[in-house]
Amino acid sequence: MHLSQVAKRKKSLMKKIQAVFRPKFLEPIKEKLRSKNVEIYKFIISNVLGAGEEYGDVITYRGITSESVFTKKIQIQIFVNDDFVKKTVDTILSVCSTGKVGDGKIFILPVDECIRIRDGKKGKEAIG
């Protein structure tokens, strides 16, 4: 895409927040996101494997122990209107940031459109 095309694109009013973090933080993140201060109730959670600076997990299978290159992580995807981006990211950081290698990453991506399948509503109304 040329720079001129990027400049012509309208500013996205919605974002996808994608965070990858240690599994032990899943429950605290869910609780904080659903709290009265944040009020995020809709998200997608996946178990993922990742490779980064931290060492992999030690696996024992049928008596044979080996070290995996990959570590188990949780990936959460949250689609929000722009007004909710800061408090969503701050919530994830407040739970997951220990200052150690392997804390994870947060990605914020523009979302051009959202369409609710149930009733065909679009944009901010559909994203909730």
Image (spheres, helix red, strand yellow):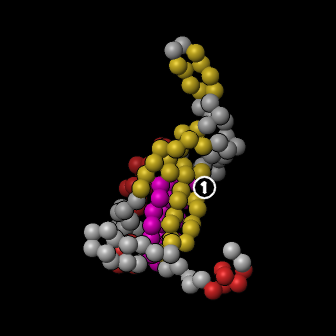
Magenta stretch: residue 121 in it? Answer: no
What quarter of the picture does the C terminus occupy?
Answer: bottom left
Name the residue rendered at 65%, 42% in the picture.
51
Residue matched to label 1? 105
- Which quadrant would residue 105 be assigned to in this image? bottom right
Q: Can you give x and y, in whole percent of width and height, for residue 115 in the image?
A: 38, 72
Q: What residue type is labelled 1?
A: Lys
Residue 93 among those drawn in magenta = yes
The relative height of residue 119 versus residue 8 in the rendered view (above or below) is above
Taking the image as drawn, is residue 79 in sight?
A: yes
Q: Is mark 1 on a helix, strand or loop?
A: strand
**In screen coordinates, is 122 left or right of 104?**
left
Task: Residue at the far top: name it.
Answer: 63
- The part of the chain drawn in magenta is 76-97
Q: Where is residue 72 in the image (x, y as percent from the top left)?
A: 54, 39
Image point 52% across, 44% down: which residue?
48
| Closer to the camera in the image, 32 or 7 | 7
In this view, 9 is above or below 127: below
Is 81 positioned to the left or the right of 35 in the image? right
Q: Which residue lies furthest to the right in this view?
A: 3
Query: At 60% from the left edge and 51% from the top edge, which residue is drawn?
Result: 104
Q: Is the magenta stretch mostly helix, strand or loop?
A: helix
Residue at (45% x, 48% y) in the render:
46
Left or right, residue 42 beside residue 9: left
Where's the N terminus, which quadrant? bottom right
Depicted 32 relative to depicted 115: above or below: above
